[in-house]
């Protein structure tokens, strides 16, 4: 599951996600700034519209705490003031407080406002909180209204993948083929499906199509590099990973991790170590960098560092047996046989589970 694996490390803190959030929320902010209330209500010497406008001015200057205070003053005068509710949700969202953003946005929707801004901000807030199923429902509304919007296509697909809604994802893939057959997201999803079926070379062709259409779309180069890496086409993989690194808002940390792995496979451990460290400085959740650094340090007898990185690799993906096995071998070398046996038992358990899952997949394949 190529794209699904890649998406496992793409969340609200990654550059590509932040870029998409900024694009969508800035558009919402512009629309909201033009819809301030005209009510004559006043609090002290300020009218309701003045309070909302003051909040908008603070938000544009990045003073979100002050903006939130102004919107709350407006809502104290009129709790149903839709512009204040939406701008309050937007201010919380822009300040990274996604949990607090949701109630005023939901209240604005209940007041009868059915706007793209509300659905967008709700979708992005829910997604940032890892509430992917709920986020998918909001993105689906946006997709119904603007099916050719690449950003919405991308985030809708991510939401369904992350929430394991396979039927909904299949339906979206079919609809994308109908309304937007040349969309890079359509090609990426087709590539994902081919990869799930083990048809890696056909998956490569789909990602190459996506790359041609949208060379600056985050994850396209990384995903194509990952496919080449799976096929042990290391030179082609390196080119794609480097292109991902070069993207201003790409998934550079992941790409650097795989570039380090290629360097390690090519017998260049010092270069690999440098790339892994650079990767982890950007994002400590890059599993391949944690695992391979653990292996490098184990070979050098830097045991405490090796243990730390291998244990982190296990924590990042407890269902993969490789780090358990490598750590077991390290404990064997250290004479800690009890820990070695426990880890090897876990390896056996995971391998058995993987074989059962593979058997079930084969039996269900028509």
Image: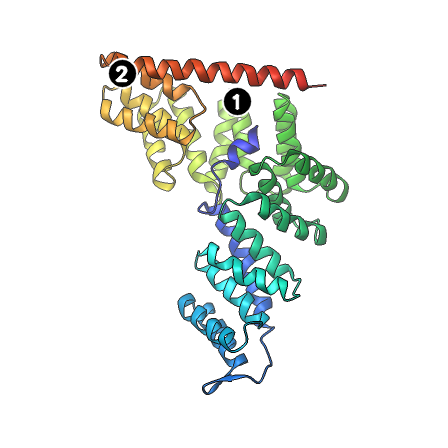
Q: Secondary structure at mark 1?
A: helix
Where in the figure is residue 173, as x and y percent of width and height?
A: 70, 37
Using the image, determine if residue 312 lies above or below residue 92. above
Where in the figure is residue 262, as x and y percent of width and height?
A: 43, 24
Of all residues, the one furthest to the bottom in this rendering is: 45
What colour scheme has been applied to the protein in the rendered image? Answer: rainbow
Q: Nearer the viewer, residue 319 or 210?
A: 319
**Residue 338 lies in quadrant:** top left
The residue drawn where x is 50% and y is 37% is: 243
Looking at the rendered image, the quarter that the C terminus falls into is top right
Badge 2 vs badge 1, beta-carbon distance below 8 Å: no
**Residue 31 lies in quadrant:** bottom right
Q: Secondary structure at mark 2?
A: helix
Left or right, 310 with reference to 92: left
The residue drawn where x is 71% and y is 50% is: 144
Left or right, 351 with reference to 284: right
Q: Residues within 10 Å of mark 2 (few under 14, many from 20)?
A: some
Left or right, 307 with reference to 8: left
Q: Nearer the viewer, residue 47 or 276?
A: 47
Q: Which residue carries the number 1 mark?
A: 230
Q: Nearer the viewer, residue 347 or 11?
A: 347
Residue 216 in view, yes or no: no
Spatial separation of the CA atoms under disc 2 and disc 1? 30 Å
Q: Of marks 2 and 1, which one's residue comes earlier in the chain?
A: 1
Where in the figure is residue 69, as x and y percent of width and height?
A: 43, 71
Q: Which residue carries the number 2 mark?
A: 331
**Residue 154 lies in quadrant:** top right
The residue drawn where x is 57% and y is 38% is: 163
């Amino acid at each position: 599951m190529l794209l699904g694996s890649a998406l496992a490390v793409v969340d609200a803190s990654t550059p590509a996600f932040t870029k998409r959030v900024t694009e969508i929320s800035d558009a919402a902010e512009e629309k909201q700034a033009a819809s301030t209330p005209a009510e004559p209500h006043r609090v002290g010497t300020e009218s309701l519209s003045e309070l909302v406008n003051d909040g908008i001015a603070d938000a544009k200057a990045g003073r979100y705490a002050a903006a939130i205070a102004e919107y709350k003053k407006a809502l104290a005068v009129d709790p149903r003031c839709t512009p204040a509710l939406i701008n309050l949700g937007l201010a919380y969202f822009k300040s990274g407080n996604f949990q607090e953003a949701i109630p005023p946005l939901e209240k604005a929707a209940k007041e009868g406002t059915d706007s793209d801004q509300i659905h967008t901000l709700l979708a992005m807030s829910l997604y940032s909180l890892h509430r992917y199923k709920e986020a998918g429902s909001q993105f689906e509304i946006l997709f119904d209204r603007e099916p050719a919007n690449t950003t919405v296509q991308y985030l809708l697909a991510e939401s369904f993948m992350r929430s394991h809604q396979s039927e909904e994802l299949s339906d979206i893939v079919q609809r994308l083929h109908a309304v937007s057959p040349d969309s890079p997201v359509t090609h990426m999803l087709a590539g994902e499906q081919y990869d799930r079926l083990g048809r890696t070379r056909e998956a490569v062709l789909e990602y190459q199509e996506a790359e041609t259409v949208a060379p600056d779309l985050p994850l396209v180069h990384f995903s194509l590099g990952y496919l080449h890496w799976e096929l042990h086409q290391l030179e082609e993989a390196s080119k794609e990973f480097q292109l991902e690194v070069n993207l201003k808002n790409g998934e550079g940390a992941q790409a650097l991790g795989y570039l380090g792995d290629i360097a390690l496979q090519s017998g260049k451990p010092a270069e690999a170590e440098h790339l892994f460290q650079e990767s982890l400085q950007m994002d400590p959740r890059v599993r391949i960098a944690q695992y391979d650094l653990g292996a490098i340090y184990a070979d050098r007898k830097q045991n405490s560092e090796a243990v730390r990185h291998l244990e982190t690799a296990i924590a990042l993906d407890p269902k993969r047996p490789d780090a358990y096995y490598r750590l077991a071998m390290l404990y064997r070398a250290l004479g800690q046989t009890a820990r070695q046996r426990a880890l090897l038992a876990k390896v056996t358990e995971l391998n058995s589970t993987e074989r059962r899952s593979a058997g079930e997949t084969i039996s269900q394949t028509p």
